Image: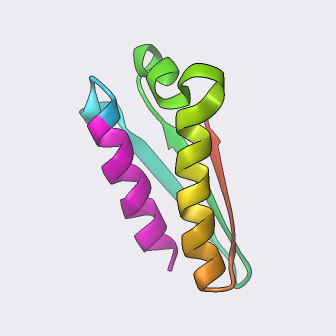
Amino acid sequence: MGSKMKELVEFIVHSIVSQPEEVEVQLEETSKKVQLWLKVAPDDVGKVIGRRGRIVNSIRSLVRVLGTHHSVRVELSID
């Protein structure tokens, strides 16, 4: 289940950033929780966060909906 969420985050972030080769998503998965850590190039952090965090919050909402569909709690952090 977590691999689908990881692929979704990678797909979305690759289309936003200017250095897609620097995008890295790490996954830690348990039976009830999926934790995703997103790493991007320092110049792209602002693009991923967006104004007032709108873009990252939208990405978080998408993966939470996917997690809710499978009864799993999902958290996304940017490193």
Q: Is residue 25 left or right of residue 67?
A: left
Against 64, residue 37 (above or below) is: above
Q: Give the residue furthest to the top.
A: 43
On-image quarter of the C terminus: top right
Residue occupying the point 63% across, 65% down: 64
Q: Is 17 or 35 nearer to us in this picture?
A: 17
Question: Residue 4's quadrant in the figure?
Answer: bottom left
Which residues are drawn in magenta?
Answer: 1-15
Q: Is residue 53 left or right of residue 14?
A: right
Q: Where residue 55 sits: x, y (%)?
A: 52, 36
Report if residue 79 is visible in the image: no
Which one is in front, 41 or 12? 12
- Say above or below: 44 vs 71: above
According to the image, what is the colour scheme of the structure? rainbow
For residue 5, say whether it is visible.
yes
Residue at image position (43%, 53%) is 9
Q: How many marks?
A: 0
* Residue 33 horizontal/vertical position (percent): 71, 73
Instruction: State the residue at coordinates (46%, 50%).
Output: 25
Q: Which SS type dominates the magenta stretch?
A: helix
**In magenta segment, residue 72:** no
Q: In the rendered view, would you say 10 is above or below 69? A: above
Q: Position of residue 67 (x, y in %)?
A: 61, 74
Residue 63 picture quarter: bottom right
Residue drawn 70% across the image and 85% down it: 31
